[in-house]
Image: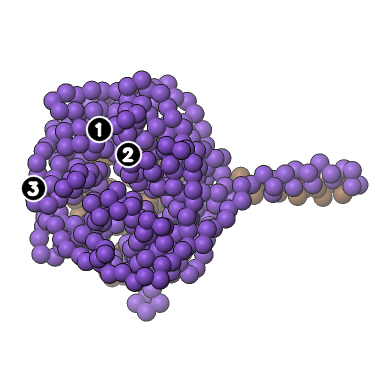
Amino acid sequence: MTKKLLPFICIIIYACVSTTKYIEVPVKTSENKINVDSSYIELEELSTGYIFSSLSTKDTDYLAMLFDSTLGVFNLITGKKINELKIPPVTNDDSTDYIINSICLNAIDDIFTISKKQVTRYYKHSITKIELNKDRKHFLLYNLQNDHPYFDNITNTLYLQKYLTEYSQSSSDFYKSNVLTGFNVKDGNLTECPVYYSPLYLVNYYGFANHVYYSSADSLSLISFPIDPNIYIYNRKSTKVSVIGGRSSFHTNEIFALNRKSSSIREEKMRHWAQIAEYNETLIDKQNGYIYRFFKQDQPLKDKITGKYNKYFDKNITVMIFNKERELIKEFKIDNKLHNNFLSFTGNAKLYIGYNSPNTKHLVFKIIKVKE
Amino acid sequence: MKTIFLLILISLTLNNCNTIRKPFDREIELNSFLQYNNVDTTEKENKYVLVLQNHSCNSCFRDLFEEMTQTINMTPIKKYIILSKYEKNFYNQVKAISNSYILVDSLKKLPDLGLSFGADLFIKYENGKVVNWDEITNDNLKKIKNMVN
């Protein structure tokens, strides 16, 4: 009897052992108390685009933002638009493959736009189209959540998200891929970065909460995931990955998983996403090396007091700030009705957050600065 | 022993093949919305309720919507169509559906009632009760057609 069951026992043991183990790194907190200042910048713009990229030079921060058929570049000191590109409409039969999904502001006059099949470089007065993902069968280089690619000027490499196309997002196999790949815009060669999805995704399914957030400055790229308190730091020079603890002090309830059978039921995934705590944008400041991170607190499906169903955007938001030693030095709440963390980026020792100002219809950002 | 093991294996396999479709758990809230819009939810007459979320008319939705309306147009059953907001062109398309009554959520009650689903909904009432429902997607269209026929 035992001999007959042995193969099944071996399979079960193998399945348990072969899963990559997840270890949460404890967050380091600093004893030094710090304060933050806030101010606002109003841009010369009435629309809001959700595909954008920022750039910091020695003196100034800039923002490039895509609106329908134009791409505007704004000076974040004056709020004025200093450059505008006309983006030709997509007319191709495979139009969804050429819809711009992300942009990279490498310099005021050097901008990349990225779609599934093409990278377009607007450099000074020239436009260069570079084929992307030609004949790729098993994976794609594509920013699924409109994240902000980074261009390394020394190696001519554009860093993009990578994902496997052979598997559905409800399969644990989808999450076995590395998440970041460098694409050389001169010769098309790829540099695979050894940063992978959080091991938590290999064990459980989290529906819509499977974003890959990444932010780069100089040789470092930060990668984070909504359901994982850890922050993964990839050093592109040494090719080493380090992990730091990034748990919010407001993260008190564990993030529950979904049954994989719910993967085809959008409403199940929406309800799950509306309830769970999650880590959003995790951004590195190029000037002072600080890390800013957004955390959304979990909430019940229904508000106990009002009886109304809670929506995703009802979640309370906090901003976490880590110093260069990767210690959490500050965490504070921001008003979820006024702030939009999806429109956030860093500048010179600053964090910019999209702000719904009641006083103007123009695009406004709140600027957070740490008081040293 | 072998038979028991085989039965367990078969039931596990079948269980894994099926997608969960839970009962419609917002019937009270939907009735509340309909009542607010002067719809008698206790009437025994059968009806269909469609809840259509925000749509910027993209081609994927347009094809699905056309097929959906063709399906429900074939039946004289009363249709209540809830629009999350008023969009003139879309409203006019919906108005053309036979025996239909359009309810526009101008006071934005749907989200508070938990009826802002991630997808459009088709809900079937019989004798004043919800008897079946599904999300209106390309994958579910066949099941919805079976509900209508």
Q: Earlier in the sequence, mark 3 or mark 2?
A: 3
Q: Residue at x 32, y 39 (%)?
A: A149
CB contact under 8 Å: marks 2 and 1: yes
Q: Label 1 sits on what residue type?
A: Phe
What x and y, as percent, mark residue A267?
A: 43, 55
Q: Which residue is mark 2?
A: A149
Q: Which mark is residue A80?
A: 3
- The quarter of the picture where residue A370 lies is bottom left
- Chain of the residue under label 3: A
The chain identifier of the residue carrying mark 1 reads A
Q: Which of the two discs, 2 and 1, labels the residue nearer the N terminus?
A: 1
Instruction: Please tell me the numbered disc located at residue A112.
Output: 1
In the image, A184: left or right of B12? left
Check the rendered structure and report the hue given to chain A. Answer: purple
Give the residue displayed 13% in from the left and 47% down from the top. Answer: A75
Q: Residue at x 44, y 24 (%)?
A: A136
Chain in brown colour: B
Q: Are marks 3 and 1 in contact (CB under 8 Å)?
A: no
Q: Say few, some or many: other residues with alpha carbon within 10 Å of mark 3 (under 14 / 14 to 19 / 20 or more).
A: some
